[in-house]
Amino acid sequence: MSCTYLITGGAGYIGSHVVVDLLARGHRVVVFDNLQQGHREAVHPDAVLEVGDLADCGALRSLFSRYRFDGILHFAANSLVGQSMQQPFLYVGDNVSNTLNLIRAAIDGNVLRFVLSSTCAIFGLPERVPIGEDVAKNPANPYGESKLIIEQILKWADRVYGLRSACLRYFNAAGAHPDFPIGEDHSPETHLIPIAFEAVLGQRSHVEIYGDDYPTPDGTCIRDYIHVCDLSDAHIRVLDMLEERSCHYNVGIGHGYSVREVLDSVRRVTGHPLPARIGPRRAGDPPVLVAASDRIRDELGWAPRYPGLDTIVEAAWRWRAAHPHGFGPAQVVD
Ligand code: UDP
């Protein structure tokens, strides 16, 4: 059945990939994005782009009066761990209140399905790794805290109003779409793989490794890197089951790679001798975040189609090599 979906943040990295995959399945897609972090060029031309801000309740009322949505996928958010340690209220304030505006609009508009971009940052320093859904949630930064608060709001939105939600806790999304020219491009860039590409492309002199004194085999932080299209696939699958009940899933490939291993992969894939220097730790970074994704595998039959780090880095590099300055004009980072 063809549905109409609202994608907030659909001009951003993960949202724009989900837009492409929903369109490919014959759905109608309306993107709502303030284009502060997103890119107009990242929105597939078959989607409708509505430029607006979730803080603007009038804009939301107008949006919901013009469309009848079968579901909402909510990506729009401030999402940087480091920034959240410097500007916490952008997170526990704006992220939460903007989402509350959207949830209210969803309930008033009788929308019954809501998918949240959540994060493994809700677990903080996890008591067990790999991290299953039931591990204690103790966010170590305001970004994780904001998403945990939103998950709890969604719990009550279901109990009281019957709004079914899926909270997908992302691990580290990377890679790029094989069928449409979009990829990862943030400004300023803070993520490891695109930063490494900037060094490869001569846009910065080196990569700084944020700490090599963590309790891991090589001293650098370990993360679970998942191809953005595998993450997108998880969204498509939860939409089908949301009619029945709300759910929470941790979505990663279940294997962790250290910062050094990621840089080695970038060297292999690009063939470039990537310079790296050790710097201080970044505030709010847990040493190891790796997903136990058994629940989504068992319940939805989800499995990563791109489970290897080099495959993910290759996909990311294919886009970045073709778009050395991402979506934007040329700039030198340092
Ligand atoms: N990292 C790093 N140097 C950088 C950017 C990131 O050492 O220039 C590390 C960071 O501390 C973390 C890992 O790479 O351990 C992944 O960071 P990223 O910002 O890509 O994703 P996050 O884990 O914060 O979601």
Image (tube, rainbow, N blue to C red):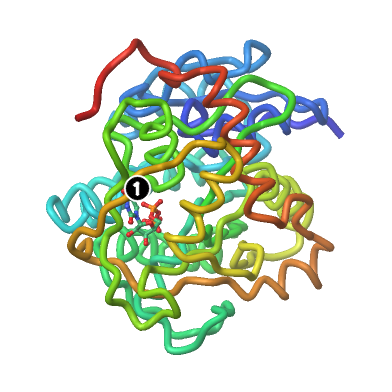
Is residue 46 toward the left or the right of residue 287 in the image?
right
- Ligand 1 occupies quarter: bottom left
Q: Nearer the viewer, residue 120 or 317?
A: 317
Q: Quadrant of residue 245?
A: bottom right
Work out which quarter of the rendered image holds the N terminus and state it: top right
| Numbered disc 1: secondary structure | loop
Q: Count the marks.
A: 1
Q: Position of residue 162 (x, y in %)?
A: 59, 59
Amino acid type at circle 1 is Ser
Expressed as whole percent of the image width and height from the top left, the position of residue 282 reads 22, 61
Is 179 placed left or right of 107 in the picture? right
**Front-lying residue, 289 or 197:** 197
Name the residue furthest right.
1
Q: Residue furthest left?
A: 86
In the depicted view, which residue is nearer to us: 166 or 332? 332
Residue shown at 74% from the left, 50% from the top? 306
Could you tell me residue 41's position as x and y percent? 50, 14
Q: Which residue is mark 1?
A: 79
Q: Along the horizontal axis of the image, is 217 left or right of 25? A: left
Q: Is residue 77 left or right of residue 46?
A: left
Residue depicted at 58% across the width and 50% down the height:
115
| x 56%, y 37%: residue | 271
For the C terminus, the image quarter is top left
How many residues crowd mark 1 within 10 Å: few (<14), some (14–19), many (20+)?
some
